[in-house]
Amino acid sequence: MITVLEIAFWAALALLVWTQVGYAAVLVALVRLPREARHGGRLSPPGGEDESSWPTVSLIVAAHDEEEVIAAKVANALELRYPADRLEVVVGCDGCTDATAARARAAGADVVLELPRGGKIRAQDAAVRRSRAELVAFSDANALWAPDALARLVGAFADPGVGYACGQVRFVAPAGARSGSVNQEGVYWRYEMALRARESRLGSITAGNGAIYATRREAYLFVDPIMGHDLSFPFNLVKRGWRAVYVPQARAREKMVPTIEREFARKRRMMSHTWPIVLRGGMLSPRGYGLRYGLMLLSHRVLRYASPLLHVIALATNAALLGSGAVYVVLFVAQVALLVGALAAGPLPLRGLLVARYYVLTTASVAAGLWDWLRRGTAAEWEPAEGTR
C-alpha cells in the first residue's frame, strides 16, 4: 500500500525533474529551431531598406552612481547601426551622488534626467514619460550591445502582435578571477536562453532580462517600484493580448559577478523582488492566459521558484523511507552527493562540482529572497553588484 510519505516524495521528485529537465526536453521535442534562429542570420531591417521608415526608438539607461561605465555605455549606444535621427539616448540618473550625469552629457546622451532616489523602476518610468519615440528600449549601464543589436531587436516589432522583445545577454568572467570561485552564471544562461528561444517560437517567453529589451510605447506598464520588468512584463503583456518574444540575434554582453558567493547575494536580492510579483503581482492568476502559456509559466517559473521547498520535501521524505527499498537508498545517496559536491567545489574546483555548487546556492537564494521579503519587505532602490563594472 502506498503511504503518504511515498506520495509526497515521488510528487516532489517528479516536479523537480519536470521543472529542471523534463520541461526543457518537451520544448526541444516540440520546437526544432532552424539554424538561423539558433545562431542568427542576416540582418532584416525593421522597416525595410528605407531607413526613414524605421521606427523611432528611445534607448533608456537607468543609472545609480555609474560614473565608471556610463560614458562607455552612451558611446556604445551612439555607435549602434541605427539611423541617428531615429534614435534617442536617455539616461535616468537615480539619485546619483557622483559624476554620472555630467559624464553622460559629455558622452553625447540626448537627454539626462537627474532624479531623486526612487529606484530603477521609477527612473525608467520617468525616462519613458520624457521620451517621445514609438518604441522604448532598455539596457543596464554596464551592458554593451553588438552594433546590430538594436536593429535586430526592433525587427521583432514588425509583427503587430508583439508588445515586448528581449535579446540575448552573454556573461563574461572578469579578468583575474580565481578558478575555484568562478561563477557558473554563463552555464545557466546558455540553458535559459535555449528554453526562451523555444518558448518564443511557441508563443511567448515567460521572463526577459534587463540588459537588452524593448516594448511598444502603448504596451509599457507602470508597475510597483519593487517589481522588476524582467519578470513582470512578459506575463502581464500576454494577459493584455500582446506577445513577448526572444530575439537571440540581438546580443549584449555584461561582466558576470566574479564569485559564486557574490552571485548568491545578487540572486537573493533579485528574489526579494521576484516573490512580490509571484505572490501578489498577478502571476498566479490564470485570468488572461491561454492553457499553453499557463502551463509554460507554471513549468518554467512557478515550479522553479518552488524548488527549495520541493528539495526539502524530497530529502526529508527520502530519509524517512530509507528502510523501504533499495531505490530510496540510491536516491538519497544522489541527493546527499549533490550537497557534498557543492561543498567540495571550494577546495576541488572541478567543473562538475562548481556547477553543483552554483545550483545549490542559487536554489537556496530563492528561499533566502522569500525570507528577506517576508521579514523586512523589499526596497525599490538598488546597488550595482560588486565586480560587475
Image: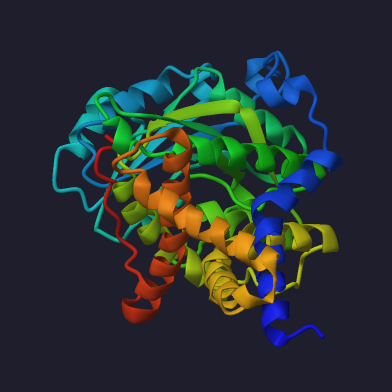
Answer with the quarter of the image where residue 318 lies.
Answer: bottom right
- Residue 143 against residue 202 in the figure, above or below: above
Quarter of the image containing the C terminus? top left
- Residue 80 against residue 326 in the figure, above or below: above
Q: Is residue 160 visible?
A: no
Q: Choose between 238 and 336: the one closer to the eye.
A: 336
Answer with the quarter of the image where residue 315 lies.
Answer: bottom right
Quarter of the image containing the N terminus? bottom right
The residue sitting at 52% across, 41% down in the picture is 188
- Residue 365 against residue 158 in the figure, above or below: below
- Residue 175 against residue 364 in the figure, above or below: above
- Counting from the top left corner in percent of width and height, residue 278 is at 56, 69
Q: Is residue 86 visible?
A: yes
The residue sitting at 41% across, 61% down in the picture is 365
- Counting from the top left corner in percent of width and height, residue 336 is at 49, 60
Q: Is residue 270 left or right of residue 24?
A: left
- Counting from the top left corner in percent of width and height, residue 323 is at 63, 76
The residue sitting at 49% across, 54% down in the picture is 337
Q: Is residue 381 left or right of residue 52?
A: left
The residue sitting at 49% across, 71% down in the picture is 276
Q: Choose between 286 and 57: the one closer to the eye.
A: 286
Judging from the image, the colouring scheme is: rainbow
Q: Choose between 304 and 181: the one closer to the eye.
A: 181
